[in-house]
Image (tube, rainbow, N blue to C red):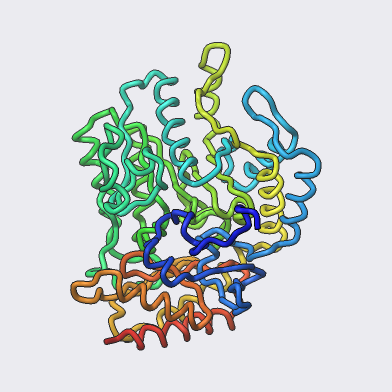
């Protein structure tokens, strides 16, 4: 038998898995082989209800025929074309389609391949804009503690998750952080937006007092996902917008998770009524069928960078696969589904039932907080003494064995199901979770 087809002693060995305990996983793997609608299937054919939309990304559910056919059709027409000093029709169509669903005034779209690339792109555009308008002293970027903005060095620099940073040494200079907004001592078991904490945005005034007019941009997630579903207090984002406007600082919303219907509107900016200057997106953009990200940019930013540049290339930035034809086709098809089926409104309608199901877990052993907004939920558990993360990981395994996929980060369970979810799916997810939490009470 040819060496290429000869089974290895462990066929899992070669793949160095991302954000995974590789040794533990390869000793007891959890494998998914196919997907359709709300369901994954294991290689043995066992059904797994998807409680996480893959990884916050399959918002329209799995195996959408329209997206598959759009990708197939485009692959047969043209597999790849460069977008450096060249173009192809479908990428312009995709950009126009994205601009139709972003807030009015954010009408220019820069394509990337992931959320991490979208964040780094937004940070670079912010710096380029400040320089182009004669504010070259504005080089400082402000993130937030417990923020997650991908794994590029720019995103890690403005991010605030210690485990994502500690292995890698130095990061970008001229970066500072706002305090996070998670305050269970004031807001435990909140339904929707917590009442306490809008004043935490005022910490930006302190950073302005410290750094003066050197701040280029502030980047925050409207709802922080990967840090454990951290919901902003009422009025917090509005206050942040006011301070940024007052001090001529750009506000970037990282909507990689909150975009494409997750909060009951196409983007979180609509649900909160707060207009940022740039929006990063990815994940749901193509319903995860092909990797793609994007940055939507306020018109003034685009025209300042492009119109004030000398003749030639205005922004020395981009990726080989920016606006890849197959990704562009997938994005158009996905956006058509979101709009035709009005999935944001469907999510908003399902939100109360989802919220009630979540809060039915109150009082279960070791559940110390429950929080939700849109179709996102966080279940915070008391860590097992001396074994942080152990309780949550064991609950994840129990749920998987019982046919439900959840996600954990530290001792927090995160749920973000596809927006096509129905009430029986919600019942099954939370019944399974309750049983697993009780089983791990010891």
Q: Is residue 273 above or below residue 361?
A: above
Q: Quadrant of residue 34?
A: bottom right
| Residue toward you, 334 or 209 | 334
| Residue toward you, 53 or 185 | 53
- Which quarter of the image is occupied by the C terminus? bottom left
The residue that appears at 53% across and 12% down in the rendered structure is: 310
Horizontally, residue 152 falls left or right of residue 293, namely left
Q: Is residue 8 above or below residue 327?
A: below
The residue that appears at 34% across and 74% down in the rendered structure is: 392
Residue 298 % position (x, y): 52, 35
| Residue toward you, 351 or 421 | 421
Q: Quadrant of residue 368?
A: bottom left
Horizontally, residue 38 falls left or right of residue 250, namely right
Residue situated furthest front in the rendering: 1
Residue situated furthest top in the rendering: 311
Residue 407 % position (x, y): 43, 68
Horizontally, residue 344 falls left or right of residue 25, namely right
The residue that appears at 63% across and 65% down in the rendered structure is: 61
- Which quarter of the image is occupied by the N terminus? bottom right
Residue 371 % position (x, y): 38, 71
Q: Quadrant of residue 233?
A: bottom left
Please state the total of marks drawn on the protein image: 0
């Amino acid at each position: 038998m040819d060496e290429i087809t000869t089974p290895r002693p462990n066929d899992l060995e070669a793949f160095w898995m991302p954000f995974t305990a590789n040794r533990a996983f390869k000793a007891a793997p959890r494998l998914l082989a196919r997907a359709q609608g709300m369901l994954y299937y294991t290689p043995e054919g066992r059904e797994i209800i998807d409680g996480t939309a893959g990884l916050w990304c399959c918002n329209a559910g799995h195996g959408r025929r329209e997206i598959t056919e759009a990708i197939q059709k485009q692959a047969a027409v043209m597999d790849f074309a460069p977008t450096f000093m060249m173009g192809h029709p479908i990428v312009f169509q995709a950009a126009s389609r994205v601009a139709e669903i972003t807030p009015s005034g954010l009408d220019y779209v820069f394509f990337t391949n992931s959320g991490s690339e979208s964040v780094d792109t937004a940070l670079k555009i912010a710096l380029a804009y400040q320089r182009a308008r004669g504010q070259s002293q504005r080089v400082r970027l402000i993130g937030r503690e417990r923020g997650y903005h991908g794994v590029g060095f720019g995103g890690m620099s403005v991010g605030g998750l210690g485990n994502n940073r500690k292995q890698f040494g130095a990061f970008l200079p001229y970066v500072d952080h706002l305090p996070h907004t998670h305050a269970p001592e004031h807001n435990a078991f909140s339904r929707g937006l917590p009442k306490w904490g809008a004043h935490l945005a005022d910490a930006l005034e302190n950073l302005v007092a410290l750094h003066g007019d050197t701040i280029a941009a502030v980047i925050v997630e409207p709802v922080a996902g990967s840090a454990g579903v951290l919901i902003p207090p009422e009025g917090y984002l509005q206050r942040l917008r006011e301070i940024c406007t007052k001090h001529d600082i750009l506000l970037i919303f990282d909507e990689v998770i909150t975009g494409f219907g997750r909060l009951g509107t196409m983007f979180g900016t609509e649900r909160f009524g707060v207009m940022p200057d740039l929006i990063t997106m990815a994940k749901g953009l193509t319903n995860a069928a092909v990797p793609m990200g994007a940055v939507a940019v306020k018109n003034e930013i685009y025209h300042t960078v492009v119109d004030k540049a000398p003749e030639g290339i205005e922004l020395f930035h981009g990726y080989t696969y920016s606006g890849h034809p197959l990704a562009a086709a997938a994005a158009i098809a996905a956006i058509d589904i979101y709009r035709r089926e009005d999935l944001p409104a469907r999510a908003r309608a399902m939100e109360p039932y989802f919220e009630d199901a979540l809060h039915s877990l109150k009082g279960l052993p070791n559940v110390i907080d429950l929080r939700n907004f849109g179709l996102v939920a966080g279940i915070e558990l008391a860590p097992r003494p001396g074994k942080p993360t152990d309780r949550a990981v064991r609950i994840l395994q129990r749920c998987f064995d019982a046919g439900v996929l959840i996600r954990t980060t530290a001792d927090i369970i995160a749920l973000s199901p596809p927006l096509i979810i129905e009430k029986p799916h919600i019942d099954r997810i939370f019944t399974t979770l309750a049983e697993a939490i009780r089983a791990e009470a010891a």
